[in-house]
Amino acid sequence: MYTVLARKYRSQTFDDVVGQNPISQTLKNAIKTGKVAHAYLFTGTRGIGKTTMARILAKALNCLSVEAPTMEPCCKCESCIAINLGEDIDVIEIDGASNNGVDEVRKLRENAIYRPARARFKIYIIDEVHMLSPGAFNALLKILEEPPSHVKFIFATTEPNKVIPTIQSRCQRFDFNNINPNLIAGQLKSILEQEKIKYEEDLILQLAKMANGSMRDGLSLLDRLISTGVEPLSAKLLEEFLGCPNSEKIYNLIAKIGDSDAAGTLAATEDLINAGLGEVQLADSLIEYMRDLMVIKSAGAESELLVLTAEQRQQAGRLAEKFDVAALIYNITTLERLRWTLKNSDTPRALLDASLLRFALSEHFLNVDELLSQLKTYPTRQGVRQSEALPRQAGTAAVPIKKKQIANPNTTTTVTNKPTAPAADKKTDLPGVNDIQSIKDDWQNILKIITAKLGNGTGGLLTSAEPTRFDNRLLTITFPASAEVQKKMCESNSRAAQIQSILSEHCGKDLEVKFETAANTQTQTTPSANQPKTIGQKRAELINDPAVKTILMGLDATITGIDENQRD
């Protein structure tokens, strides 16, 4: 009779359990020091060793080959063998889903008072304990708080949040981790070698990744491949029998996106869909593969975070050169949101095509640091180079920006950093320059001249400011309290000298310019701090933010999308 791999190769001792070393070591120490708790709660996803660990603990406590609980059960005595088969009279395994009523728990309490038939402890293993009814949980409370000395409870659950707090507080809780794909791969190779089944190396890692951290799932998938009767087992079988996407086709799609090839992106998507891959599966595959590229860009192709063969690392490394980290982060987060929409959409293919085309047609996805570094050397349309160090804002994410074409990009204009003395025969545009009112009246005209000579970036910074005092050739320009950033930017990188030069030339006098910020006053129209802002108000604030404006002006770009990050 054939025994499935998950049962045939179930771990027998603490040291055999794969990927749960901290829990194994803690339980072994508890046995060694004689401090075994009366109740344990094992939590974690399916197939990662919760029930297996419970059986091993039961064998360790009740092994008949030794006179006391042991860290290394013999697995050969009557008790150990019966526990492995789930038939031991002193180790009772209960399915919480089908025995979830008050009557079943009351019966358990009545039987628990009797001593074990042949072993040291009577052990109750309740699987999927979260399925118990509220009444059943309450019936457990008293015996959990003051259990007989010969009784131990081991609860296992995939949903610990459904186990009431009064039960959890009476247990020692252990959270089982998802198993690393490399550990799963090692176990799969060991089993194939013991079974004397031939396989190709690239199969193992892909199969381990498909297990999603569950050893039992990995063994079940391997069982399905073995049942095909094909040897050697290869990665091609994953595509034919398990529906795994062809990695070459996924890499081809990503390459088309990286090359900004719109037609090629659609064709590569069509190829994958025709191969039987659903829209949601395709999105999941892209997330997984783009995650690998993101790791390569951030930590290098040799990073241990990657579960790839040597050939796949080289191929992924070449693809990673087509992207920057910000683009990959944006793509992954967008696809994650998209996959939930695809599940409920009547037109999932159209949504998928539109999103992938958006990735392909966006020429640059830059994070704030890269945008600021470009501003130091990127010429604006008027030729003035931007070099402001904008304040970095917490929570800033990558912004998709599509650059416009710039006419005559090599044309530059030199601007003198020092004020230029007006020509002797230059006729002043402001005869009454000694009067601050005359400067105020002509301020809009002055802003147009500054914008024409220094560019939209500088002109935009001054739109919120106004001249307030003029005394002995010193002109004071005042910004509102909310425009502290614009004031600092006007003072940086010789911009103040450039503004001063233009004002001196326009007014026909050698002026000095001083920037200041007005006192912080709140008008009646200012929203209350506790009043929530609408989405429209938030987006308007972002678009009008001086840092965003300066970036857009410096790169001569437009915003193609705004995503709002939810914060706690």
Image (spheres, grey):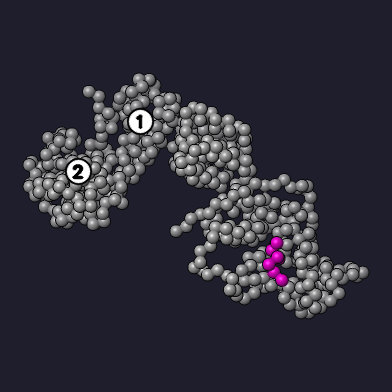
Q: Residue at x 34, y 38 (%)?
A: 214
Q: What numbered label is drawn on residue 5? A: none
Q: Residue at x 53, y 62 (%)?
A: 533
Tell me the mark number nearer the camera, choosing from 1 and 2: 2
Q: Residue at x 27, y 28 (%)?
A: 4
Could you tell me residue 135's position as x and y percent? 20, 52
Query: Which is nearer the eye, 109 or 302?
Result: 109
Residue 279 in view here:
yes
Q: Quadrant of the N terminus?
A: top left
Secondary element at image label 1: helix
Q: Is residue 464 magenta?
A: yes
Q: What is the crowding at mark 2: few (fewer than 14 residues within 10 Å), some, or many (at least 20)?
A: some
Q: Quadrant of residue 156?
A: top left
Q: Is residue 84 left or right of residue 340?
A: left
- Name of the residue lying farthest toward the bottom: 472
Q: What numbered label is drawn on residue 221? A: 1
Q: Is residue 116 magenta?
A: no
Query: Which is nearer the eye, 464 or 250?
Result: 464
Query: Which is nearer the eye, 199 or 25?
Result: 199
What kind of residue is marked 2?
Asn
Q: Is residue 335 above or below residue 543?
A: above
Q: Is residue 406 left or right of residue 293?
A: right
Q: Is residue 354 above or below residue 145?
A: above
What residue does disc 2 label? 99
Could you tell me residue 94's position as x and y percent? 19, 42
Query: Which span is picked out in magenta?
Result: 460-466
Secondary element at image label 2: loop
What kind of residue is marked 1?
Leu
Residue 306 in view here:
no
